[in-house]
Image (tube, rainbow, N blue to C red):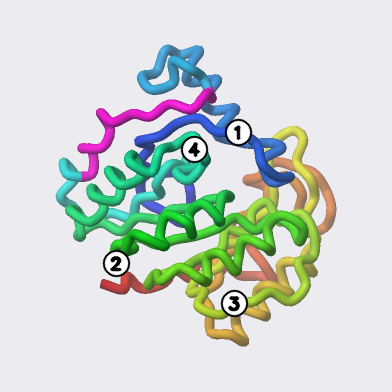
Amino acid sequence: MSKIEWTEQTWNPVTGCTKVSPGCKHCYAETMAKRLQAMGALGYENGFELSLLPERLSQPYRRRRPTMYFVNSMSDLFQEEVPFEFVEQVMQVIQETPWHTYQILTKRSARMREYFETHKVPDNAWLGVSVEDRKYGIPRIPDLQEINAITRFLSVEPLLENLGKISLKGIRWVIVGGESGAGARPMDESWVLSLRNQCEKAGVDFFFKQWGAWGRDGVKRSKKANGRHLQGRTWDMIPAIAI
């Protein structure tokens, strides 16, 4: 099982990435990749340098129980150095394992849109973009909305500022979370409530993942101590599987 609250398993046919926006500043995947490299783990011989791992493409076939997979939790499938030919192989696996559901998240929204201009989105693939701020995150949303996908979602983590009013047209799910780790940047409760209220008004499922290193009271403490409650309750909404 994955420790990520909104999925069940991770599948990483690609590892390694590069930073493209402020949301990448304290990348958990980079820290984990270096740790795995030091441990001698397979697939992390290059640390956080980009690595294509075709030997992992067969993994979902071997799991017969329907599973929610987060694709490339340790990378970004649509970074420029990943050939579209390899993306096609990943999509073929997704198409051939319709009993699973795959969550694909990117910060390279323009390249994802480019790929799906000439390729059909598998019905069991959920497409999402990261939206951490106004300058870099908000412009990714229109790219996602232009793709003909059954399920589109936004990962607003880490939420770094008040996003204001956002377009939720065609969006089925919004995940929001604060940053964790030693250098974590604080998240204001009003920013979260604004997004939750917009989701409720638009009928979009809302998932509050965590406060992170900073609590709603502005005090820095352990992520576990800060918890996941927003206004006295947890928000764990996830769209129904639409296939």
Whichever of callouts 1 and 2 sits on the residue coming sooner in the sequence is 1
In which quadrant is the C terminus drawn?
bottom left
Q: What kind of element bears circle 2?
A: loop
**Residue hosting label 4:** 75
Q: Are marks 3 and 2 in contact (CB under 8 Å)?
A: no
Mark 2 closeness class: few <14, some 14–19, many ≥20 residues within 10 Å: some
The correct choice, above or below, for 59 with respect to 227 in the image is above
Q: What kind of element bears circle 1?
A: loop
The correct choice, above or below, for 132 with respect to 27 in the image is below
Q: Amino acid at mark 1?
A: Thr
Whichever of callouts 3 and 2 sits on the residue coming sooner in the sequence is 2
Cα separation between marks 4 and 2: 22 Å
Q: Amino acid at mark 4?
A: Ser
Mark 1 closeness class: few <14, some 14–19, many ≥20 residues within 10 Å: some
Is residue 55 part of the magenta span, yes or no? yes
Q: Amino acid at mark 2?
A: Asp
Which residue lies at the image location 71% right of the left edge and 67% below the top edge?
192
- Magenta residues, as a range? 48-60
Q: Which mark is residue 123?
A: 2
**Residue hosting label 1:** 18
Q: Closer to us: mark 1 or mark 3?
A: 1
Whichever of callouts 4 and 2 sits on the residue coming sooner in the sequence is 4
Q: Closer to us: mark 1 or mark 4?
A: 1
Cα separation between marks 1 and 2: 29 Å
**Residue hosting label 3:** 168
Q: Image quadrant of residue 189?
A: bottom right
Q: Position of residue 125 (x, y in %)?
A: 34, 60
Mark 4 closeness class: few <14, some 14–19, many ≥20 residues within 10 Å: many
